[in-house]
Image (tube, helix red, strand yellow):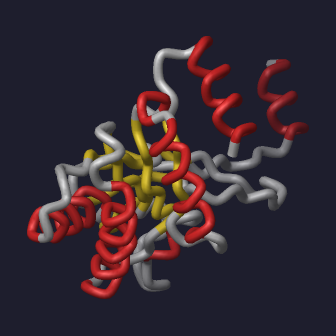
Amino acid sequence: MNELIVQAENLCKHTRHVVIRIPIFEQGLSSLFNTLLQLVQQKPYLIHSIIFDASYIKEKSNKTIRIHCCVYFLFFQKINGFYTGKYIFCSEHYPGNITEYLDKSQNQYENKVYYGNLSLYENINLELTKIAIPNVLYGDYACIHPFRNDVKAYNWIPRIDFPTRDSIYFQKFVVMLVDMINVRGILSH
């Protein structure tokens, strides 16, 4: 714990704010909560914000909302009174492959898909308000899927995404490959 406090204090010398990110669905969450609780009890001024990171959520459901609210409730029970900084709920509803949300019969190159980040946040915040947990701020991954895809980018097709409150409109641009010999022939005339 002392090493963590020293690291946080040194970081505070070089930045204005320190933010702690809690990955909600990681193993060892209880241990992380206990460590964070000790840090906040000893040096509450070091932590500006705590991000509850739900990572990728494919669909909004009552079960999803209940799970998140339980995690927050357990955390707030332990930390209430020690910490006065900001709380942020962060998730991403953006798929790793946008066509995950489409049926095979739907247009795979130009379409719209449901985007539920804000709606999920509003539902969770409403439930947290009912159990007297202070206003939790909104965060997201800015339409970037939170898991890294290390697969090679062969057959990559450029795409423009336009997110709105509830949907993402997208259009893929298919580049036609042209026989270079024909192109050279046209250019030489």
Position of residue 157 in the picture relative to residue 61 (left or right): right
User: Residue 77: percent from the left, percent from the top?
Assistant: 32, 66
Residue extending farthest left: 130
Q: Quadrant of residue 11?
A: top right
Position of residue 46 in the picture relative to residue 31 (left or right): left
Residue extending farthest top: 14
User: Residue 162: percent from the left, percent from the top?
Assistant: 35, 45
Q: Observer-nearest residue: 163 or 33?
A: 33
Q: Quadrant of the C terminus?
A: top right
User: Residue 71: percent from the left, percent from the top?
Assistant: 39, 72
Position of residue 144 in the picture relative to residue 117 (left or right): right
x 78%, y 53%: residue: 153
User: Residue 54: percent from the left, percent from the top?
Assistant: 46, 63
Residue extending farthest right: 181
Establish if 108 lies above or below 165.
below
x 90%, y 38%: residue: 181
Number of numbered labels in the structure image? 0
Position of residue 181 in the picture relative to residue 32 (left or right): right
Q: Observer-nearest residue: 165 or 78?
A: 78
Establish if 3 lies above or below 171.
above
x 33%, y 37%: residue: 85
Q: Quadrant of residue 93?
A: bottom left
x 55%, y 72%: residue: 25
Q: Observer-nearest residue: 148 or 81?
A: 81
Q: Quadrant of residue 97?
A: bottom right
